[in-house]
Image: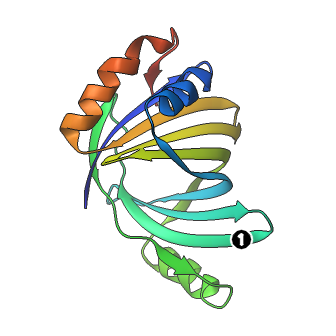
Amino acid sequence: MIEYEYSLVVEELKPYLDYCEQNKFEKIADTYQIRELYKNPNQILARITTEIIEDKQYTVLDFKDDNDSDAILKQSRETIPLVITNESREAIDSILNMLGYEVKKILKRNRIVYVNNCVKFELDHYMEPEESFVVAIEGEKEEVDKIYQEIVGFDNKTSVN
């Protein structure tokens, strides 16, 4: 699946939270996540994401193009997530090792997700490896372009993630 995404490092999340609320975006998630990023020479990231919701923990594996460009709008391929169980984790680690994947970094964050039609806002407060705030807008290109133009002036620090 092809994904269009604006990803911005910002000073704070409040203006973007307000935008979502005022524009009838529906809040669908507010979670704590630990994401292990794995890299190999083929420019495809493997991502193991553990999401903690209340007292339950969910872990998935997916793959995404490793796009380190400075472009604000990125287009990349992304797989459908595969659920990892306690029983399958050792096999997943073994497969990633066999394919030459090595840990790139581990991220810890709170993520709030809003949706409206074909657009998804992901509002992240990263605690590790360093504190930062990131806003991502994903969806169909025309729609994310339109919303990006509406929010681009919210923050003086806005830059590419």
Q: Where residue 151 sits: x, y (%)?
A: 40, 20
In this view of the protein, which residue sits in the foreground, 13 or 104? Answer: 13
Q: Where residue 79 sits: x, y (%)?
A: 34, 67
Q: Where residue 41 sits: x, y (%)?
A: 36, 58
Q: Quadrant of residue 140?
A: top left
The residue depicted at 45 percent of the width and 20 percent of the height is 159
Instruction: Please tell me whether residue 109 is drawn above or below residue 93 in the rendered image.
Output: above
In this view of the protein, which residue sits in the foreground, 85 or 13? Answer: 13
The residue depicted at 56 percent of the width and 87 percent of the height is 91
**What residue does disc 1 label?**
57
The residue depicted at 55 percent of the width and 38 percent of the height is 123
Residue 107 visible within the image: yes
**Three-letter amino acid code at the position of disc 1:** Gln
Instruction: Please tell me whether residue 64 is drawn above or below residue 143 in the rendered image.
Output: below
- Which image quarter is the N terminus in? bottom left
Graded by Cα atoms within 10 Å as few (under 14), some (14 to 19) or many (20 or more), the crowding at tag 1 reads few
The residue depicted at 59 percent of the width and 63 percent of the height is 49
Q: How many marks?
A: 1
